[in-house]
Image (spheres, helix red, strand yellow):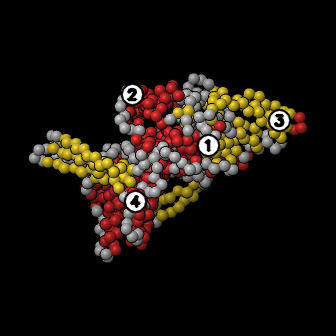
């Protein structure tokens, strides 16, 4: 079972027709028919070489949902989703997701599906999902959905999972990895494509916030602990060791940095060369690096260290402004953060000086969280308030609100513990107000930007966790916000409620997200206005009204 050992497969399956009426394998079915004794057979042929980990065979009692997809070259591809009979009605969104992923891959990367048939098997008997060539196999829990029981988050997750496994057709199947040490390339590149797909189908900023929050929560602690390892580990005891947040999550960020450095056009040129050079091959991280480098004629310097070094880069930024000389300076210190060995190694410094600056600016750093690092700056509370209200980079706008919210909550927790009066910074409320009233701001982003940091997040930052104090402070802040902004919240709820049948699209998802966050902040408990909340149920949908 080595990914660099590749072969073409022709598979003949024979089975009892009554017990196993459906016989599936990779590729196209080239012959099928009946046999004596109530048996039947099917012969499948996959014209593309693949390693054995991509081989699959399915035999069972399944029903299918059929559809077709017309490729950019005019070929008609048959699409089939196979499930137990009772689950067939829950596959509509899965089919939508598959067709959306196929079209997106053609539009963005010029990658067309390469066979006449694409099968998906959805059963409760396996874990997760697997990208077996032309026969993707999924656990029912990550694919099946209906409006009666599924949420927007469920629908978005299904869209991403199906897109991810389909995108592996080119980044993982047609071009696979030479050995398992290159897993971070195969998975990092495909997850990056999945994230771009979800960004284009929804809100780019909200998707980035979600991806970074997951990285901070899951991968950073791994990098800071005793099992820290690079994206491409140097050795392993068990293959299971490779399925880590570092290999997958940080590997994705490394791929994303290529795109940040090269831009969309440059990254596409690198991808085109990568497929031109390596279609049908088993490759390494260096092969991908060389394709990006050669296609754009650039020098990436020591970029490959991202694959071989464990730990999280630490960046400390300090600023100074001289009104007399009208100069603004940024001093940037960088090191590799290795907390589990209690050290920062290889400190380096660099100064940037800006001239003819008429007044002190507020820096917006690391736009879009362009690299997986820990950033510390000397931004003041007033700076963060300004960025929350005015930053043109929405990710940094969100993060400014989160940083300010954490600082405010920690200070109020200390005041509560000392029985001091609690007073909320009015600038923080004004920042939330400016977001809510922004005319050109995506509603789903607003729902993220006005949400307070979680109680668990605040307790993680304390030397000694105090759940009662943290909860009391969060209640206090919510009450203050609700009291100050109740009219705006009420307007938002009224403008974004709907009794229409459920639809999964970005405008509907964004509308529901904003309405729900506003309802959570503006409730009778928080608003203190005597207004009551009424739940009106219509069919399978629950709609809240404030009256």
Which x, y percent locates residue 302? 37, 38
State the residue position of label 4.
453
Image height of 452 relative to 21, above or below: below
State left or right for residue 126 relative to residue 516: right
Mark sitting earlier along the chain (1/3): 3
Q: Secondary structure at mark 2?
A: helix
Q: CA distance from mark 3 to mark 2?
A: 54 Å
Residue located 46% across and 34% down the image: 286
Nearer the observer: mark 4 or 2; the answer is 2
Identified at 79% across, 42% down, the residue is 20
Residue 197 visible (yes or no): no
Q: Residues within 10 Å of mark 2 (few under 14, many from 20)?
A: some
**Relative to 196, is 99 on the left or the right?**
right
- Residue linked to disc 2: 296
Q: Which residue is mark 3?
A: 40
Horizontal side of residue 96 vs 515, given as left or right: right
Whether the residues at callouts 4 and 1 have beta carbons within 8 Å, the answer is no
Q: Secondary structure at mark 3?
A: strand
Front residue (pair 415, 315): 315
Q: Position of residue 515 (x, y in %)?
A: 46, 54
**Disc 4 vs disc 3: Cβ atoms closer than 8 Å?**
no
Mark earlier in primary sequence (4, 1): 1
For marks 4 and 3 on the same chain, the one whose residue lies earlier in the sequence: 3
Badge 1 crowding class, 10 Å Cα cut-off, few under 14, some 14 to 19, many 20 or more, is many
**How far apart in space, not on screen, are marks 4 and 3 (Cα)?**
60 Å
Q: Which residue is mark 1?
A: 130
Distance, label 4 to label 1, CA atoms, is 35 Å
Q: Residue furthest right?
A: 37
User: What whole-number distance in Å separates the C-alpha atoms at marks 4 and 2?
Assistant: 41 Å
Q: Residue at x 70, y 36 (%)?
A: 25
Q: Residue at x 45, y 59 (%)?
A: 519
Rounded to the nearest angstrom, the CA distance separating label 1 from label 2 is 33 Å
């Amino acid at each position: 079972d080595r990914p660099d050992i590749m072969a073409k497969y022709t598979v003949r399956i024979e089975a009892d027709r009554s017990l196993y009426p459906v016989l599936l394998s990779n590729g196209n079915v080239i012959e099928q028919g009946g046999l004596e004794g109530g048996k039947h057979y099917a012969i499948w042929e996959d014209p593309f070489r693949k390693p054995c980990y991509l081989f699959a065979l399915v035999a069972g009692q399944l029903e299918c949902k059929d559809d077709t997809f017309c490729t950019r070259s005019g070929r008609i591809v048959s699409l089939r989703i196979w499930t137990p009979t009772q689950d067939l009605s829950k596959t509509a969104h899965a089919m939508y997701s598959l067709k959306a992923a196929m079209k997106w891959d053609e539009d963005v990367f010029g990658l067309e599906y390469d066979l006449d048939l694409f099968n998906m098997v959805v059963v409760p008997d396996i874990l997760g999902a697997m990208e077996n060539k032309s026969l993707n196999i999924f656990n029912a829990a990550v694919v099946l959905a209906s409006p009666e029981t599924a949420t927007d988050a469920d629908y978005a997750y299904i869209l991403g999972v199906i897109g991810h496994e389909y995108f592996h057709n080119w980044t993982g199947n047609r071009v696979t990895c030479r050995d398992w040490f290159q897993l971070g390339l195969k998975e990092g590149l495909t997850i990056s494509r999945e994230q771009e797909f979800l960004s284009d189908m929804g809100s780019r900023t909200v998707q980035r916030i979600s991806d970074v929050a997951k990285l901070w929560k899951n991968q950073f602690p791994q990098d800071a602990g005793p099992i820290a390892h690079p994206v491409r580990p140097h050795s392993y005891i068990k293959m299971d060791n490779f399925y880590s947040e570092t290999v997958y999550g940080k590997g994705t960020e490394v791929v994303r940095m290529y795109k940040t450095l090269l831009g969309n056009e440059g990254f596409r040129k690198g991808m085109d060369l990568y497929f031109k050079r390596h279609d049908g091959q088993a490759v390494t991280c260096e092969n991908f690096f060389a394709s990006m480098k050669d296609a754009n004629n650039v020098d990436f310097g020591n970029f490959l260290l991202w694959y071989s070094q464990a730990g999280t880069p630490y960046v400390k930024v300090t600023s100074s402004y001289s009104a007399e000389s009208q100069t603004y300076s940024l001093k940037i210190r960088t090191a590799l953060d290795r907390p589990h060995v209690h050290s920062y190694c290889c400190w380096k410094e660099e100064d940037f000086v800006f001239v003819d600056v008429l007044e002190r600016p507020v820096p917006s750093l690391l736009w879009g969280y362009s690299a997986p690092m820990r950033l510390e700056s000397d931004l003041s509370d007033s700076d963060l308030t300004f960025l929350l209200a005015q930053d043109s980079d929405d990710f940094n706008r969100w993060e400014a609100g989160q940083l300010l919210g954490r600082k405010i909550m920690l200070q109020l927790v200390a005041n509560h513990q000392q029985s001091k009066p609690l007073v909320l910074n009015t600038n923080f409320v004004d920042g939330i107000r400016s977001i809510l009233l922004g005319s050109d701001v995506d509603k789903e982003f607003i729902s993220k930007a006005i949400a307070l940091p979680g109680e668990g997040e605040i307790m993680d930052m304390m030397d000694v966790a105090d759940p009662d104090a943290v909860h009391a402070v969060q209640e206090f802040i919510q009450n203050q916000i609700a009291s100050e902004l109740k009219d705006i919240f009420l307007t938002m709820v009224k403008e974004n409620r709907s009794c229409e049948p459920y639809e999964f699209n970005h405008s509907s998802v964004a509308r529901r997200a904003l309405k729900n966050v506003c309802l959570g902040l503006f409730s009778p408990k928080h608003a203190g206005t005597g207004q009551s909340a009424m739940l009106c149920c219509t069919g399978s949908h629950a709609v809240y009204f404030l009256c």
